[in-house]
Structures are given as structure tokens and as C-alpha cells.
Amino acid sequence: MTHKDSTPVPPRSPTPSSLADRLQAARLRAFVGRQRELDTFRAALDDTERPLTVLYLTGPGGIGKSSLLRRFAQLADEAGRKVVAIDARGAECTPEAFLAHATNALSGSGNVLLVDTFERYRPLEAWLREEFLPWLPLGTIVVLAGRARPAPEWRNDPAWDDILEIVDVAELPDEDAVALLSSRDVPESRHRSVLGFAGGNPLVLSLAAEAAVHEDADGRVSDTEPATATWTPSHDVLGSLITRLVGDAPSAEHRRALDVCSQAHTTTETLLRTVLTDPDTDAGAIFAWLRDLPFMESGPHGVHPHDVVRDVLDADLRWRDPARHRIARDRILTHIDNRLQELRASTDPDADSVARHLCANALYLQRDGFGRSSQFDGRRAGHVYEDALRPGDHRALLELTAREHSPEFAAVIECWLGRQPESFRIVRNAATREVTGLLACIRLTEPRREDTDADPFAAEAWAHAQRTAPPKPGEHILLAYSARTPIGSDPTAHLLGANLMAQIIRSKQLAWSFVVIKDFEALYRNPYNPEQLRQDDAVHLGDRPYWVFRTDRRLHPLQIRPEAKSAPTLSREEFDTAVRDVLRNWQRPDALAISPLTQLLAQGSGSDPVPALRAAVTEAVIRLRDERNGYKPYQAVIATFLDPSAIAGSMMPTQETVAQQLGLPFSTYRRHLTQGIDRVCELLRRP
């Protein structure tokens, strides 16, 4: 605990005369922004009529609460107020200990009491609210700063309405974040990359700034670098951020839950129950733990971490354990795919909305790099929202389409606005409500002359369908247009893409889907494209070429895991036998390459599935180690199969040799080995 002297601090001399003065001056130079919070505190200092003021600063780790308290202390000092500052880190959490450090705030009026890391005093919150604070002298200002929000009792008691003010400390806006980087001498050429990783979190900005300035000779910053010069955080920076922002997880399963949160757009208890593999795991308890973490936010579809925490967790896992990163991603995608298959024919009135959310989650999992996505930019997601077409939107839609495409394309959209207005979904700017994107999914059951004459894409779609595999009676085709191609990092495109996927999945008796795209290269960035079109397949509208992404949905129903190949169906006995064969042939890549498990456990691994297969099996063995009573079976499996070199003098040890090296009777060793193999098979069988 640190305790600032309760006597008034002497005025600072213009020239620092001590180390404390120098430290204070350096902190003030590094402090940027927070005008709203500073104005709130100054107002409290100026309001001498209020009997008591309690400001409750809340926000995740690294957001700048401690820096604000230091700035508040300076303002209070300049106003002639006595300051008592308490930091709860390492403090004893008892009323007596708290009083011992806060006693000076009880004498005289107009004092300022600053309490940092207040979440450690949560057991004392009721005592502070009901006994300590009411006895403070008139005019006292109390600032409590912590990661957790105040208990509901503060709001439930009307007596605190005029006394308590909750201040949510948010990330710095872009201009203040740039000012912080400039104050740390980060070259302007690196600002974009650092901001792309750190966002507006002051702690992450500070650590990233220090790393960007003090790079080694292989990556030294230069003022002559272009404005697009890239920077990514080192593993040391990631490790420091994990410690400062996240802290320790109570168990291996809690850590895996964080791995899930770092990848899934939103996390639910159901998702955890599906993805976490230990059968003894209490998914409900782990979900409750996630909800209470200070860097987690709750929404209508589950919980999700703050953007910068997600980015740090994801980048750390990619570096620390690429196999686990892949496995977590694949299990989440499998869960989403299974849920969407359940929704294909659902009559639930919420099915369309749930399907759109699941598709958005699937697109989000396609992201790549540090905090940025080939499909989605999470920090901008809240800037837009999806909405239905309204009567006053027609003009805005046509102007947007003419601007993004051409007047000729806008004429096609105008045609369908008149014929199928119910087929349109739009995206609006959350602040201005203006239209930022449109998606039109036109349902066609027959090639009507008036449609094909007005729309060359409809003519091309019907010509291709009738030439290759015409729709059967009762079937239809879907023709999709957008003012933004539904591929890219723009959140508008992300919403439109998720909506299109959901409509394809939910469309009953859909024969063909035709998606009009103006960017030919986008077809090859789209993981859901089963057909490779040629450049000369273009359909021209005016002087602009377009391409139609065409798919026979009877042959290629939309799958959320586009890399999945047709996998063999194995009985439990066959699966377990294959696992035992993989373990026995661990040192023989040729034998592993033909294992039926490569198509089940190593999908999407390219031409050489052996490393991915080994990674999946190794992951299961590691999980065995982390389980209750799992360490001895883990030792037996490792020593027998995965690391035979650990047995001195033998590359192909006998089981008797392994038992001897482990110091176990042969019967005990065999029992542990059997238990270990059986459990590894069980872990690998679970999706």
C-alpha cells in the first residue's frame, strides 16, 4: 500500500528540485486527454455547497485510472485541498486497516480522498457505503477507482442519487492516442501500426510506444519510413500485456475459456460447454467467471472481451500454441455449423436473427493478424447497424448505388425496389442513421421476360441455370446485389455478408445462388467460393465489368467450414484403433499420412497433414496432463510413444524399459498407459 502524506503538499517550484518532482513532471508531460473526467473533478472542487461528493471511476486494467488519480491529486493540491491517497494493492482488507490509512481524511472539511485499485476493497464496500463515508466531514471529495462497477446497492438507495457519480473511463479517442504516441517520441510513420494494435488503451499504447522506439537493429525505426510502415508487438510486449491486462487464470480450463473468447465474436455458456473438453468442467461456473472479469462486456448474444484484450489474447495464443489456436477455432466453427444446420428448417420466429448472428460470428473467425480481420474490424462494428427498408430510403439507396457502382447499376436496383421491396436489407450509420450499404436478395421462380430485359444479371443467371441444371418445380434461384461487396474489413460489408449467408442457409428449396460482385479478386479471397471463374466470364453493365458468383446449392449447400473435405465415417472402435495406430507410428510420417484421422483431425492443413495430426494428438495428451489424476497416465503415454528419446539408450523402447525408467512396476505402468490411451481417444472423439 502507498499512502500519500495527509498534510498539504508544498507548491511545486518551476524547476524540479527532487526526484519526486522530476517523476511528477514526467507523468504530467505524458498525460493526455481525459477532458471530460477532469472537468467533472474540477466541478466537484468548485462546488462547496455539496456535503459529500463520491466519484466512482470504473474501467478495465490499463485504461488510465491511476493516471487520472495522480492528475486529480495535482488539481486538488493546486486548489489548496488536503489529499489522502490510498492504493489497495497489497493492502489488508479490513475496516481497521482502511481507517489507519484514511484517518487524516476525517479531520477538517474539504479534504480529498483518492482510493486506487478499489476492486480489492470489494468485501468492504457495504461498510464503506453505510458506515465510513457518511461520517466524513462536510465538503469531502472521495474518488474510488477500480475495475469492477459499483454494487447495485449504491443505485438502489435514493440517498446516494445526488452524491454518487459513476464515471466510465473509456479508451482514448484517436487524437489523444496520437498525442500520447507523439509525447513518447514514436515516429509518425509508426503511428498507424501502433494504433492498429493498441487502439486507445493507454497502457497498451505506452508499452507499444516503448517497444516501437527501442527496437533492435533488425527492426530499427527510421524517420524516413513510409507512412504505411508496419509494426507488430514482440512476444515480450504480449507477455507483459497478458500479465497486466488479464492476470492469471484459476485453471487450465479457465485459460481455454479465454482462448475461446479471443476468437469467438461472442461467447455463451452453450459454446463453452461444446468447446471445452473436460467432462468434469462446470461450463456455467466458468461462464459466470468470464462475466465478472473487468475487461468483459455483456451483450444480447453473450459476452466478449474489450477489443485490445481480445487482440492481445489472440496474438499471444497464435505465438504460444498455434495448434491450440487452430483447434479452438475449428471447434467454434463446428459448433456454429451445427447450430446453423439445426436452423435450416426451423420455424422459430427468431431463427433468422439467430442465423445472421451465427454467420457474423463465422465471418469473424476468418480474421487474421493483430487485431485486424480480413472480414471484420471489431472496433468499428458498433458504428453501424442492420435495418429493414423504409419508404423514405429509396432515394438514398439509388444515390449510394450510383456512387459505388454506376447509374446503370442503380437502374437495376430501382427496378427491383419496385418489384420486390421486401427483398432489401440495409445498413445504417449508428450516429446519423444514414444508409451505408444495401443487400438485395431477389427470389426468382421463373425466367420472366420483363425481368431478364430489365436486368442483364437475371438474364445471365437464368441462362446459366437452364444450360447446366434447371430448377425443379417448387425450387427457386436467389440473385444477390450489394452496394458494398460483402467481403472486406468494413463493418457494413461484414453485416451484409452475414445476412447473405444466413439467407442462403435459411432459404427452403433453393436451387441456385447468384451473387453479383464488381471485384474479381474478391472471388479468390472468399473462402466460400466453390467455383473458380475466369476473368473473361464478366458481365458488362455500361462500361463496367461484373462477375456472378454462381453456386448450385443442391450440390454445394453453404457450409461454415469451407475447408472441410468429405471425411470418412468411423465407428468408435475404428476411431480408437486409428488413434492407437497413430501413437504406435508416431515416428513414421509415411504411416501417419495415410491415417483416416488426417481427414478428421487435420482438415485444411494443406498437402502435408502430418504436423496438424500430431498437433491435434499432442493437444489431447496435454489436456490429459492437466486433468485430475491425469499426470501419471500422461507420463506413460509420453514416454511410450511421443518421446521415446527420453528413455536413455533406446529409440524404440520396449514397454518393460519404459516401466523401468519410470520407476514403476510393470502392471502399474500398464494400467496407467491403458488409462492414458483410452482418455486420449475420448478427448479426440469430442468435437
Image (spheres, rainbow, N blue to C red):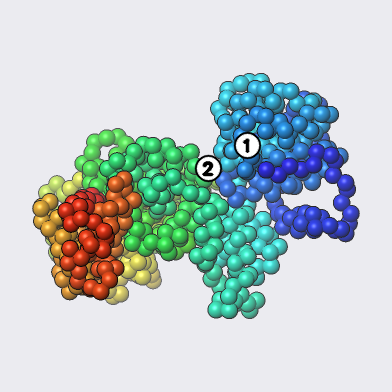
609 on left or right of 269: left
Q: Which residue is mark 2?
A: 294
Looking at the image, which is closer to me, 101 or 273?
101
Disc 2 crowd, CA 10 A, few/some/many (<14, 14-19, 20+): many
Q: Quadrant of residue 613?
A: bottom left
Residue at 44%, 45% in the rendered image: 250
Can you give x and y, in whole percent of width and height, for residue 484 in the image? Answer: 42, 58
Q: Which residue is mark 1?
A: 92
Can you give x and y, in whole percent of width and height, for residue 171 in the image? Answer: 60, 50
Disc 1 crowd, CA 10 A, few/some/many (<14, 14-19, 20+): few
Secondary structure found at label 2: loop
186 on left or right of 400: right
How far apart are labels 1 and 2 at the CA level? Answer: 22 Å
Secondary structure found at label 1: loop
472 on left or right of 159: left
Identify the mark at residue 356; answer none if there is no mark.
none
Q: Quadrant of residue 120?
A: top right
Residue at 37%, 41% in the rendered image: 268
Which label's residue is closer to the chain start, 1 or 2? Answer: 1
Can you give x and y, in whole percent of width and height, for residue 5 in the image? Answer: 80, 42
Can you give x and y, in whole percent of width and height, for residue 242 in the image? Answer: 51, 55
Q: Mark 1 belongs to which amino acid?
A: Glu
Can you say which quadrant of the picture contains the N terminus? top right
Q: Mark 2 belongs to which amino acid?
A: Pro
Looking at the image, which is closer to me, 588 or 187?
588
237 on left or right of 638: right
Residue at 50%, 65% in the rendered image: 235
Residue 372, visible in the rendered structure: no
